[in-house]
Image (cartoon, rainbow, N blue to C red):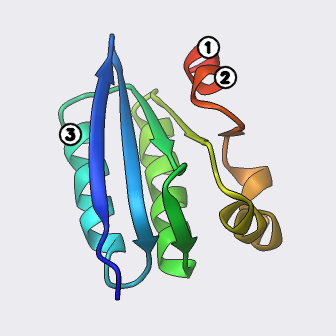
């Protein structure tokens, strides 16, 4: 079992949260708590960088959707970027690619957030 490592980068007023490892039912609560922490700190612009995310389960997808809705409710913006092929496939098959704001690169996400 792989644990999840969370890497935080603050670029101006944008919080970039890097999720490193597997995002599954075991690690999703930790990722959700971290994202919520930033939402509660009134961060209005969050990017989830999935460059080093190897796997996303349905529990991980729920976190993405829930966070997206929470950010929208407070007038904020949440973008997802840098998904690897295996993760992108999960997002596509689940239909989440159409629901969430997914960008190819972090630069693209930064430009549009």
Q: Is residue 21 left or right of residue 81?
A: left
Residue identified by numbered label 3: 40
The picture quadrant where one finds residue 31 is: bottom left
Q: Residues within 10 Å of mark 3 (few under 14, many from 20)?
A: few
How far apart marks 2 and 3 lie (CA) works out to: 25 Å
How far apart marks 3 and 1 lie (CA) works out to: 24 Å
Q: Residues within 10 Å of mark 2 (few under 14, many from 20)?
A: some
Q: Is residue 57 above or below residue 36?
A: below
* Residue drawn where x is 72% and y is 52% of the image: 99
Locate residue 106, reporting x and y percent. 57, 29
The mark lying in front, picked from 3 and 1, is 1
User: What label does residue 79 carry, if any?
Assistant: none
Locate residue 66, reporting x and y percent. 47, 59
Residue nearer the viewer, 97 or 86: 86
Q: Are marks 2 and 1 in contact (CB under 8 Å)?
A: yes
Say which label, 2 or 3, has the lower sequence index: 3
Q: Is residue 48 above or below residue 31?
A: above
Considering the numbered disc 2 on the image, is that residue within a helix, a strand or a loop?
Answer: helix
The mark lying in front, picked from 2 and 3, is 2
* Residue drawn where x is 56% and y is 80% of the image: 58
Residue identified by numbered label 2: 108
* Residue drawn where x is 56% and y is 21% of the image: 113
Q: Is residue 23 left or right of residue 41?
A: right
Residue identified by numbered label 1: 111
Locate residue 77, reporting x and y percent. 51, 30
Q: Is residue 101 left or right of residue 19?
A: right
Q: Is residue 46 above or below residue 1?
A: above
Q: Are marks 3 and 1 in contact (CB under 8 Å)?
A: no
How far apart marks 2 and 1 lie (CA) works out to: 5 Å
């Amino acid at each position: 079992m792989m644990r999840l490592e969370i890497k935080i980068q603050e670029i101006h007023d944008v919080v970039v949260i890097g999720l490193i490892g597997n995002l599954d039912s075991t690690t999703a609560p930790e990722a959700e708590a971290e994202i919520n922490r930033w939402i509660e700190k009134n961060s209005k612009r969050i990017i989830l960088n999935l460059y080093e995310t190897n796997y996303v389960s349905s529990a991980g997808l729920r976190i993405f959707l829930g966070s997206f809705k929470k950010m929208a409710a407070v007038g904020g913006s949440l973008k997802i970027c840098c998904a690897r092929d295996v993760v992108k496939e999960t997002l596509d098959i689940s239909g989440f690619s159409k629901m969430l704001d997914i960008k190819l690169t972090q630069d693209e996400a930064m430009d549009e957030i």
